[in-house]
Image (cartoon, rainbow, N blue to C red):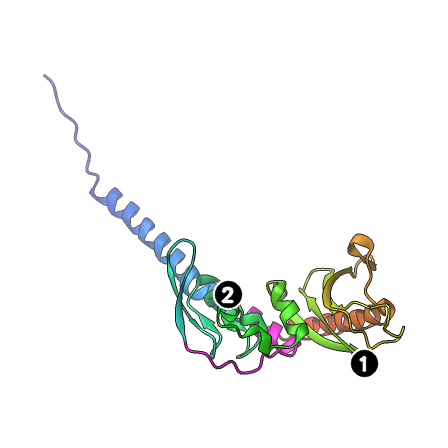
Amino acid sequence: MNQSITFDYGPFALVIFAAISLFVAWLLIVHFILRPRARQRRYAKLNAMYPPYLLPPLECNSRRKPDPEHRQYQVNLEMLTCTCSRFRNHRAYFPAQDIRRLCRHLRKELENADLLPRLDDLTRRIIQDRVRDKCYLSLSTGESRFAIGINPGSHFVRVFTRRKLDIDPPEGPFTGAYDKFVFNAGQENWIYGEAPPQSDKIIALIQEAMRSHSQGHHREASLD
């Protein structure tokens, strides 16, 4: 006599469903609450350690700018805001009018609106480099103004300074176009072997800025 055996999957299915629900809920909490809060704290520390690199007010109407994938992003040059994910997740945490808020859509819109000529040569050169650094400092070696781009945890420092023309005096001011040089602070040498004018003074200012960052980092860490 054949007997059929049946299994009751009800309790087991409920346990599996509850486990999956908890896992999905945890992923949502991490994505929408924990990660944004951690990111906000990280950028708050960064903003506390370095001063903002501010752009002048830009008067221009907002307009929609399609990207190559035909999606639409709302770009506002007066407020320096964009609805793209890169801006919302990273650049939006920088202070108002800070150059680091410029995502690729804002940079493209500055070009389309013909607003780049309103900016000084040094700022335009940083924008040309796609504003890739977490911190920018405007410094000076006497009469020559330059800027450095720093990324915490990295030894590489971008230096934006003018080239020296043959007619320029050895101690400046220099009248060549602004260009980018890269300094390896760990090995204390210039990438590709090309050093900017007054490189010794620039290196001293870079090292001072790196020490200030290190001290600021330890001060912030002690408060956690």
The quarter of the picture where the C terminus appears is bottom right
Dominant secondary structure of the magenta stretch?
loop
Question: For numbered disc 2, what is the local secondary structure?
Answer: helix
Q: Nearer the viewer, residue 156 or 23?
A: 156
Residue flagged by tag 2: what amino acid is it? Answer: Lys
Q: Based on the displayed image, in which of its 4 quarters is residue 182 positioned?
A: bottom right
The answer to whether any part of residue 224 appears in the image is no
In this image, 170 relative to 99: left or right? right
Question: For numbered disc 1, what is the local secondary structure?
Answer: loop
Determine which residue is flagged by label 1.
143
Crowd class of label 1 (few under 14; some 14 to 19; many from 20; radius 10 Å): few
Q: Earlier in the sequence, mark 2 or mark 1?
A: 2
Residue furthest right as drawn: 170
Q: Find residue 134 and report its horizontal and vertical position in percent.
A: 62, 67
Name the mark on residue 114. none
Q: Find residue 22 and report its horizontal and vertical position in percent.
A: 34, 54
Q: Which residue is painted at 57% across and 69% down in the image?
A: 42
Q: Which residue is painted at 82% across and 54% down in the image?
A: 193
Reply yes or no: does residue 54 show up in magenta: yes
Q: Which residue is painted at 79% across and 53% down in the image?
A: 192
Give the spatial CA distance, label 2 vs label 1: 32 Å
Q: Which residue is painted at 65% across and 79% down in the image?
A: 51
Q: Find residue 119 and report its horizontal and vertical position in percent.
A: 61, 77
Extent of the magenta region: 42-61
Residue flagged by tag 1: what amino acid is it? Answer: Glu
Q: Find residue 62 and report its horizontal and vertical position in percent.
A: 41, 75
The answer to whether any part of residue 16 appears in the image is yes
In this image, 161 relative to 42: left or right? right
Determine which residue is flagged by label 2.
108
The quarter of the picture where the N terminus appears is top left
